Image (cartoon, rainbow, N blue to C red):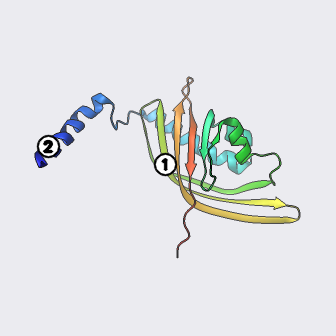
Amino acid sequence: MHFRKTVLVLVLFLAGPALGLAQNTLSADDVAKIRLVHKQYEEAWLKGDADGVRTLFTDDSVLLPPHAGKPWIGRKGLNEFWFAPDAPPTKITKLVVTLRSIGGDGQLAYAWGTDEVAWTTVQGDKTTSASHTGTFLNVLRKQPNGEWKISHHMWDDALAQP
């Protein structure tokens, strides 16, 4: 039985690249562009640039926030979740996105890591502050012009420590 497992692992290891299994074929240029997308994401939020945030996502993007109960799909979903016109004014005061891993095949990529975000919300005369740390996972697609855009964005909130 041990022999079979060893052979299976060896076959997958040797044949994996030919089959396209677990292969990271991103170029250094692709990795740099994916890092840039995440840097631009931070900068756009910190400047309060909603259009700048929107341009980093594909038209058919999917947001998968924690506790949302449903995915928010496309430009409409992105606008309803983050940029609803009737939502109270909100300002991102801190956003630190730390990439831990980037991989992919040259047309589709993933990036995951941690984030720290803080914001203020104004309702009437009252300003409230909130923050959280968590982890995120982004799936990105290479566009025909060579740019990378986020197609799926998922994040969580860190659990309170006892």
- Residue at horizontal 62%, vertical 62%? 132
Q: Tell me if residue 131 can be seen.
A: yes
Q: Which of the numbered marks, if any, corresponds to residue 36? A: none
The label nearer to you, 2 versus 1, is 2
The residue that disc 1 covers is: 112
Q: Rounded to the nearest whole Å, what is the CA distance between mark 2 and mark 1?
A: 34 Å
- Residue at horizontal 56%, vertical 48%? 154
Q: Is residue 60 left or right of residue 88?
A: left
> Please, which residue is most extreme toward the bottom here?
162
- Residue at horizontal 47%, vertical 37%? 109
- Residue 13 lies, in percent from the top left, at 23, 38
Q: Amino acid at mark 1?
A: Trp
> Please, which residue is most extreme toward the top here?
144
The residue that disc 2 covers is: 4
- Residue 162 lies, in percent from the top left, at 52, 76
**Looking at the image, is mark 2 or mark 1 earlier in the sequence?**
2
